[in-house]
Image (cartoon, helix red, strand yellow):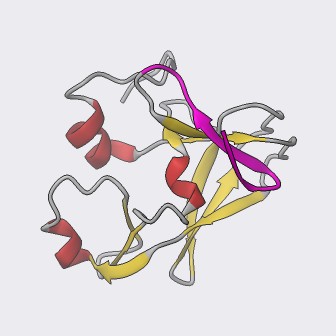
């Protein structure tokens, strides 16, 4: 287990999910959690990157390549019933709690249709939520 911030720990998630980000304290609905960080690249260039799993589009012009391990938000796994969402503000991707998150709970986000169809659907969703895209 690796603690990377006083509020989070990266550790093994559910089977088939790899590493996940877990809360070390309670987080209130609406609370800012962290920023999705990485190298800012053109969305056109990102469209040509094959099998890039950590790309997060800001807008039609810019995308964040969040592959560096220093990007703590990259450890947030997909869920069809997530407890966080991304808000884009001034070219930054901010992760916000959409409901109260309890200490010990894994942070999750909906990866949306394009990522889901390319990477998750072919192997089957393992999020455990009743609703799937």
Measured from the top left, where is residue 85 in percent x and y?
59, 51
Measured from the top left, where is residue 81 in percent x and y?
55, 30
Quarter of the image holding residue 119?
top left
Q: Residue at x 83, y 34 (%)?
A: 103
Q: Is residue 17 left or right of residue 62?
A: right
Q: Is residue 81 left or right of residue 83?
A: left
Q: Residue at x 46, y 19 (%)?
A: 15
Q: Which residues are magenta?
A: 1-15
Q: Is residue 49 left or right of residue 39?
A: left
Q: Looking at the picture, does residue 73 appear above or below residue 102?
A: below
In the rendered image, residue 57 lying in the magenta stretch gets the answer no
Q: Looking at the picture, does residue 97 appear above or below residue 54?
A: above
User: Which residue is at the front of the view, 125 or 71?
Assistant: 71
What kind of secondary structure does the magenta stretch mostly adopt?
strand
Quarter of the image holding residue 55?
bottom left
Q: Residue at x 25, y 75 (%)?
A: 43
Q: Residue at x 70, y 44 (%)?
A: 9
């Amino acid at each position: 287990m690796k603690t990377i911030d006083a509020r989070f720990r990266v550790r093994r998630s559910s089977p088939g999910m790899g590493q996940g980000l877990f809360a070390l304290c309670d987080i209130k609905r609406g609370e800012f959690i962290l920023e999705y960080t990485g190298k800012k690249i053109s969305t056109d260039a990102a469209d040509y990157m094959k099998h890039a799993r950590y790309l997060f589009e800001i807008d039609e012009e810019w995308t964040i390549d969040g592959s560096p391990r220093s990007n703590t938000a990259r450890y947030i796994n997909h869920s069809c019933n997530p407890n966080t969402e991304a808000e884009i503000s001034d070219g930054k991707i901010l992760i916000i709690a959409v409901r109260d998150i309890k200490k010990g709970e894994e942070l999750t986000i909906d990866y949306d249709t394009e990522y889901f169809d390319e990477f998750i659907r072919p192997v089957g969703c393992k999020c455990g939520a009743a609703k799937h895209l």
